[in-house]
Amino acid sequence: METLVIAFDRVSKCYPGGVYALSDVSLRIEQGEWVAVMGPSGSGKTTLLNILDGLDQPTSGRIEILGRDTSHFGTDEWSVFRRENIGLVFQQFYLIPYLTALENVMLAQYYHSMVDTKQAMKTLGRIKLMDRARHLPSQLSGGEQQRVCIARALINEPKIILADEPTGNLDEDNEKTVMDIFRGLHSEGHAIIMVTHNPNIGQLADRRIFLNHGKITRSN
Amino acid sequence: MFWRILFDSIVRRKLRKALAVFAVWIGISLVVGLLMLSIDTGDKMNLELGSFGANIKVTPVSFSIPVTVGDYSLNSEKVSAYLEESAFQKLKEIFWRNNIMGIVPRLWASAQLNGKNVPLLGLWLEHKIPLEGGEVFVSGARQVYKHWAIQGNWPLSGAENTGLIGQELAGRLKVSLGDQVEVKTDKGSIDLEVLGIVSTGGQEDSAVIAFLETVQKLAGLQGKVSEADVSALTTPENRLAEKYRIDPKSLTSAEYERWYCTPYPENIASGIQETIPNSVARVVRRISETQGAVLTRIKGLMILLAIFTLISCSLSIMGILASAILDRRPEVALLQALGAKRTNVLALFLVEVAFLGILGGLLGGITGSWVGRGLIEAIFGGKPDGHLALLILSPFLGLIMALIGSLGPIWKALGENTAQVLHGN
């Protein structure tokens, strides 16, 4: 039976100056669903993602994630909710440069509960990076860094994975590797919301949402 | 994991951390060096200003015996007295003993030299006073009258038949360096070798100067002195001293205690007067006030300089740390995105900054002491006092400067819009 993980009800985000990044967006995402958010630059894709992960707050509307109304969460409440339920994958990877690949993964464990080296190594094994565990980000390729970023997002077994252009900085080979990992995560039942410009990647998703000027113009 | 992150951050980013430590190090070095200098300036300058001469003059009480008939005062006979030389040894036992830097008891007598009447001055040229704990305090004209210009040499203790002659007298009587002169009084005579010709700008220029003991024998006044000069380290008079002078009763008990324990010239003079029987100790205001004015200005200048250095170093450290922390905004945003609370991130950064501040402060304390010693030696020529307290204080100073310098930037980084930093939105 499908379970609702995300429900947006007439969510708007208005920036100072009266610019609407999102306007009356309503959206429902089920457990295990892979949704690609697409659209031109400035259409509101990233704002949608930022509101989903609690890094930005909506101006109006109601948001329910995993059955909880997050519309009025404070910063610390969001921190706790995010580390328990959401895994984040960034276009720029954002690995801590002075921590090894293993330590970067363990960092997410540390703020979630407690560190477990074996589990972190196992997660790196899932993305085939066990042999690079002791390397610093500067010693890894772009694709490897993105895989470490994905391992960090997965380590706490989140129900939702939010990815912002995860292959935006990768070459074709690395793009394929990373997308294979996402396919695997999808098959394991994670809900994936992925912002992308790339129509080929969008085709891998169960559903594509097209945004333009902050409104959902199409969904298929 | 907290300590692992900290360790990795410091060890794997040595250059960046070294820059922050270096900034604190240099800042604290300058501040500690200048603080050492400003602390030592008082005493060292006081010693330097001692070359102006003694700042306290001790004389016997001259008292008048009134002779009256009815309501008429017929006359007054002035009676001179002498002071006991042995009493001056006790000045190194009184409350102000550490402030007394030089004592020169003097005895004036009349003598004949080459058939001419001349003043004869006996004084401690280089006298040793044994102190508690086996130390010896050496005091005499050589230590106190630094402004005396000597052509030749000072007589050395033990050579009782050597002495000095005033420049004016030497010229008048055609006495040269190395001459043997016969000094004669009613009580005896001595052949004195002239080791030096002295120019003081005072009465000594027309006198024969010899060891006190020699003059006492020649004058038949064993153990007696007619006056004494004392050089003391004093604190310039301030509002408290002025308040006491105007109305002693206006001082509160705490103020009185502070006044009583402060080495104002009057306080030390009073202590000397109590110790030397039948004496009057007067502050030589010309010297004391000049010293006070110079010291007050120099100390003020040094403190001002130390404050400005502290402020400018703090600003420079703040700039460097602010830039280093603002460079790490994505790291702050990421930690928050991974679920770290503000307090978690704050603790992580502050502990790191504290470590760098303490390390920089410690290094700054060591090099600052070295810089301070160098400055003091270069300016005053003497060895500086120990400043262990500054060395202990410097890591804390480094810690405070680093925390003040970084708290604002860390707080600012925490307040940044995480989404904007991570997604560039």
Image (cartoon, coloured by chain):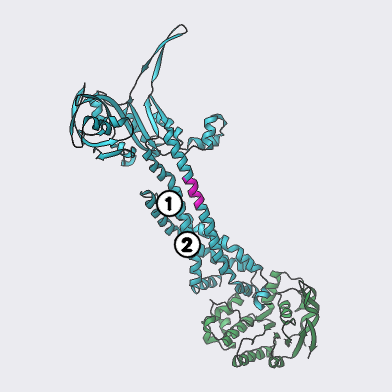
Chain colours: A green, B cyan
Tally of numbered tags: 2
Image position of B355 with respect to B333: above or below? above
Relative side of B199 to A44, left or right = left
* Place of residue B219 in the rendered image (x, y in percent of width and height, measured from the top left): 25, 24
Identified by mark 2, the residue type is: Trp
Residue nearest the viewer, comparing A89 with A216? A216
Secondary structure under tag 1 reads: loop
Residue nearest the viewer, comparing A68 with B106? B106
The local crowd at label 2, few if under 14, some if 14 to 19, many if 20 or more residues have their Cα within 10 Å, is many
Q: Quadrant of the N terminus of chain A?
A: bottom right
Identified by mark 1, the residue type is: His
The disc at residue B387 is: 1
Choose mark 2 or mark 1, whichever is in front.
Answer: 2
**Residue B303 lies in the magenta stretch:** yes
* Place of residue B265 in the rendered image (x, y in percent of width and height, measured from the top left): 44, 35
Residue bounds of the magenta highlight: B298-305
Subunit of mark 1? B
The disc at residue B25 is: 2
* Place of residue B308 in the rendered image (x, y in percent of width and height, measured from the top left): 52, 54
